[in-house]
Amino acid sequence: MKCLWREQLVEGEKQKPRAGRKECRRTGKIVWFELNLSYQNLGDPYQRENFIRILRRLIRVEKLQLVDNSLTDLSSVRLPRCQTLNLQRNHLVSLCLLPKLPAAEHLCLSDNAISSLCGLGAMENSPLRSLSLSCNPVTFSPQYRARVFSLLPKLQVLDGIPKLPEDCVPCPALTSATTSMCKIL
């Protein structure tokens, strides 16, 4: 079912429905494509469960804001049309706990507790162009930028900074068994 803008004549001008939604000509139903569900104060488990249930139903959303919701696991959610997702200031500890995002172009994961790049390779074939991991422990790991760009070759912007020539430097094998050592002088 393809939804198109319903054009209405108001004093000789064409108007669109309010920003963030489309009205389907065929059914007349409102389809939300831009949604802000930030600051939901999800303190109790039943609230989180219902919130996840709602997120699972958002299969047509294209732009989703989920800022500061204390979310920890979204792996059961699939957002097939979502192009922009903002998960800033939640409690995500791993990239493996993200929702499935086959169409994501912009992803903000700032101010979480992500400590490794494990799971980032799953997004290798996605159209992701912009990623923000700022204020996460993973940003302090050695060769962080080079590792992210090697895992996501289509990525153009990381943490608000465009891809730089030094970000393309080949880095050692990216395995979870890789350890880092400090030199003691």
Image: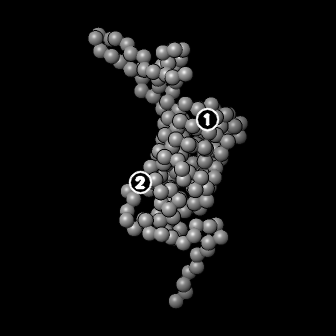
- On the image, the x and y values in percent for residue 98 come to 60, 48
In this rendering, the count of numbered labels is 2
- Along the viewing direction, whichever of 36 and 8 lies nearer the viewer: 8
Among the two numbered marks 2 and 1 on one chain, the one whose residue lies closer to the N terminus: 1
Q: How many neighbours does mark 2 have within 10 angstroms: few (below 14), some (14-19), or many (20 or more)? A: some
Residue 156: mark: 2
- On the image, the x and y values in percent for residue 107 come to 49, 47
Q: Is residue 26 left or right of residue 93?
A: left
Q: Amino acid at mark 1?
A: Leu
Residue 86: mark: none
- On the image, the x and y values in percent for residue 87 come to 53, 46
Q: Residue furthest right?
A: 46
- Along the viewing direction, whichever of 24 and 63 lies nearer the viewer: 24
Residue at 48%, 46% in the rendered image: 127
* Residue 158 appearing in the image: yes
- Along the viewing direction, whichever of 140 and 31 lies nearer the viewer: 31
Q: How many neighbours does mark 1 have within 10 angstroms: few (below 14), some (14-19), or many (20 or more)? A: some
Q: Quadrant of residue 164?
A: bottom left
Residue at 65%, 45% in the rendered image: 75
Question: Eyeballing the image, is 55 above or below 75?
Answer: above
Q: Is residue 131 left or right of residue 49?
A: left
Distance from the alpha carbon under mark 2 to that under mark 1: 28 Å
Residue at 39%, 20% in the rendered image: 16
* Residue 47 appearing in the image: no
Q: Is residue 33 left or right of residue 51?
A: left
